[in-house]
């Protein structure tokens, strides 16, 4: 103990010195001067815009952001602005956002940029959610008329909103437009943890715990998919805006199904959860229906977003109220889920309100934080359940070990032997089984002359040594006071005979504890229609014959 304390003290000193050197290195290296990635020089062109609709002037001297009244579908809407005649050479890239619309950028009626939908697949082109466009302005464009034309294919909540146009270097604009790192962190974290939890659940043996972790992982994937798809930072990885949008729709329609299944398999709930499960199936069906409607050009997923968002909020609110009722009825296990549900419900309600107000979700950090917080609460609950279950399993295994283990020798006791015999007789796999009956000679005499302590030492010694000389597949049990039985699967007559001779020889030579062991053997061959207890009886008779022979040899000596 003293040596361990000294090593622990030395280790603390070494770690403290490492920390001091690390802090010192950070301090001295902090004086290294480097150029920043971004200068932060971004200018907003948010005034003096003219809006034309279908070639006619709709409004002049407009300030951005600006929203048009619906409908805007199938209308040609263009924004016009005069480019300054002088701009720094390093700040001649413009950036602006579009949502669910084709884009055509022109300078003096000359096309310089085009964003259009896919040429095949959907009947109506799908452009994805909010998307940031970057366009480099040439020297010849300075002082010209900038025209940005939007073509909308839907009247959904994303359509008809125009944000300011920014100008600067492309690096500065990337940081300005796509630098929403908190939401990107939340989204990636939820997706990664969700995937790991799903994979981990496949290794869990117990059915309920496996399903609980599996559906929890799917909940995290749904939340992570929604958060990730809503942050502009996703375009650093995926420039196609439609792909993340599909991830958000799948997450929206499948979240109720995953959530209800998680509740069913993680909390003590009654039959009241069944209606919610059926409703969650309806949500999943809506996703399939939406795909069919979009395929034939009847409507788009985004047209279903607001009504489905409202329906989801109502669904979660009803579930939340019912869980509160159950909680106050005495189901205290629901407390953690109610907290998580509060975060999630608040996030969904905030999402729906923003959509109804036509507010863009580019900076929905609070919304994403709420979703991440709900996931953390559910994760803690799942970990707690696993910890409780693990303790319970360990306790059961300990009790089982105590019930079927001989306290003195630590081999199987008679109850364990009887259970093994029942398993062998009930098993359909009829393998040949070798039987060794072993008896420690004169143990009663040793107890009477040398004391029971000596006898106990001999019993423990025999159990320890016999397991070493027999094959690892052998199962050893204490059959009676000084009798032991070993069952060895798949052995021939020659092999079981050699094992018996090995045991007999091993205990015939001197050791710290000197004693002899009588051995008898037989084989249980199911094909011969032998009864197992008859084979054990023959091995027992052979063991007593061996004991008798050993006593006669000892008397003759």
Image: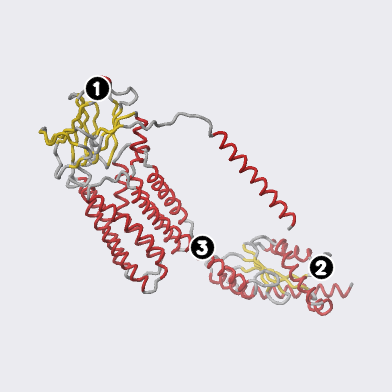
- Left or right: residue 404 versus residue 506 is left
Q: Is residue 419 above or below residue 199?
A: below
In depth, the one of 136 and 237 nearer the eye is: 136
Secondary-structure class at tag 1: loop
**Where residue 127 sits in the image (x, y, percent)?**
24, 39
Q: Name the image colouring.
A: secondary structure
- Tell me the number on the disc at residue 513: 2
Secondary-structure class at tag 3: helix
In depth, the one of 302 and 317 nearer the eye is: 317
The residue depicted at 33 percent of the width and 32 percent of the height is: 42
Residue occupying the far bottom of the picture: 448
Q: CA distance from mark 1 to mark 2?
A: 105 Å
Quarter where residue 465 is shown? bottom right
- Tell me the number on the disc at residue 85: 1
- Name the N-terminal-most of marks 3 and 2: 3
Q: CA distance from mark 3 to mark 1?
A: 68 Å
**Where residue 170 sits in the image (x, y, percent)?**
34, 30
- Tell me the number on the disc at residue 387: 3
**Where residue 478 sits in the image (x, y, percent)?**
68, 72
| Cβ atoms under marks 1 and 2 closer than 8 Å | no
């Amino acid at each position: 103990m003293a040596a361990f304390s000294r090593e622990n003290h030395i280790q603390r000193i070494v770690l403290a010195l490492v920390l001091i050197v690390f802090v010192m290195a950070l301090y001295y290296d902090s004086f290294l001067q480097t150029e920043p990635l971004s200068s932060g020089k971004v200018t907003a062109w948010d005034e003096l815009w003219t809006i034309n609709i279908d070639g006619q002037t709709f409004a002049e001297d407009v300030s951005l952001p600006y929203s048009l009244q619906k409908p805007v579908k199938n209308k040609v809407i263009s924004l016009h602005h005069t480019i300054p005649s002088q701009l720094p050479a390093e700040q001649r890239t413009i950036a602006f956002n579009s949502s669910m619309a084709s884009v055509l950028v022109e300078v003096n009626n000359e096309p310089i940029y085009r964003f259009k939908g896919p040429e095949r697949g959907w009947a109506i082109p799908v452009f994805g959610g909010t998307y940031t466009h970057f366009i480099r302005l040439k020297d010849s464009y300075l002082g010209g008329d900038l025209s940005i034309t939007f073509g909308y294919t839907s009247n959904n909540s994303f359509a008809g909103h125009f944000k300011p146009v920014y100008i600067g270097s492309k690096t500065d604009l990337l940081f300005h437009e796509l630098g929403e790192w908190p939401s990107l962190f939340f989204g990636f974290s939820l997706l990664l943890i969700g995937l790991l939890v799903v994979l981990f659940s496949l290794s869990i043996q117990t059915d309920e715990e496996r399903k609980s972790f599996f559906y929890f992982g799917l909940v995290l994937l749904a939340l992570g998919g929604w958060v990730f798809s809503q942050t502009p930072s996703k375009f650093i990885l995926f420039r196609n805006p439609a792909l993340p949008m599909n991830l958000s729709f799948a997450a929206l329609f499948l979240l109720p199904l995953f959530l209800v299944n998680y509740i069913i398999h993680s909390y003590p709930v009654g039959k009241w959860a069944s209606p919610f499960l059926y409703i969650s199936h309806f949500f999943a069906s809506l996703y399939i229906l939406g795909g069919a409607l979009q395929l034939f050009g009847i409507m788009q997923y985004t047209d279903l977003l607001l009504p489905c968002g409202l329906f989801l909020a109502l669904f979660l609110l009803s579930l939340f109220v019912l869980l509160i009722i159950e909680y106050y009825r005495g189901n205290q296990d629901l407390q953690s889920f109610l907290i998580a549900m509060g975060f999630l419900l608040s996030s969904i309600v905030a999402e729906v309100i923003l959509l109804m107000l036509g507010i863009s979700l580019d900076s929905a950090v609070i919304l994403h934080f709420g979703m991440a917080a709900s996931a953390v609460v559910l994760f803690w609950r799942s970990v707690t359940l696993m910890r409780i279950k693990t303790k319970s399993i360990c306790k059961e295994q300990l009790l089982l070990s105590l019930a079927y283990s001989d306290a003195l020798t630590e081999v199987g006791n008679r109850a364990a032997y009887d259970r093994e015999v029942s398993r062998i007789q009930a098993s359909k796999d009829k393998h040949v089984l070798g039987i060794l009956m072993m008896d420690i000679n004169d143990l009663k005499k040793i107890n009477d002359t040398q004391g029971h302590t000596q006898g106990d030492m001999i019993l423990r010694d025999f159990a320890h040594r016999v397991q070493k000389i027999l094959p690892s597949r052998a199962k050893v049990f204490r059959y009676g006071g000084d009798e032991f039985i070993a069952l060895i699967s798949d052995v021939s007559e020659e092999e079981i005979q050699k094992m018996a001779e090995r045991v007999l020889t091993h205990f015939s030579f001197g050791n710290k504890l000197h004693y002899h062991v009588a051995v008898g053997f037989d084989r249980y061959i199911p094909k011969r229609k032998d009864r197992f207890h008859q084979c054990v009886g023959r091995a027992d008779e052979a063991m007593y014959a061996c004991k008798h022979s050993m006593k006669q040899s000892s008397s003759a000596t």
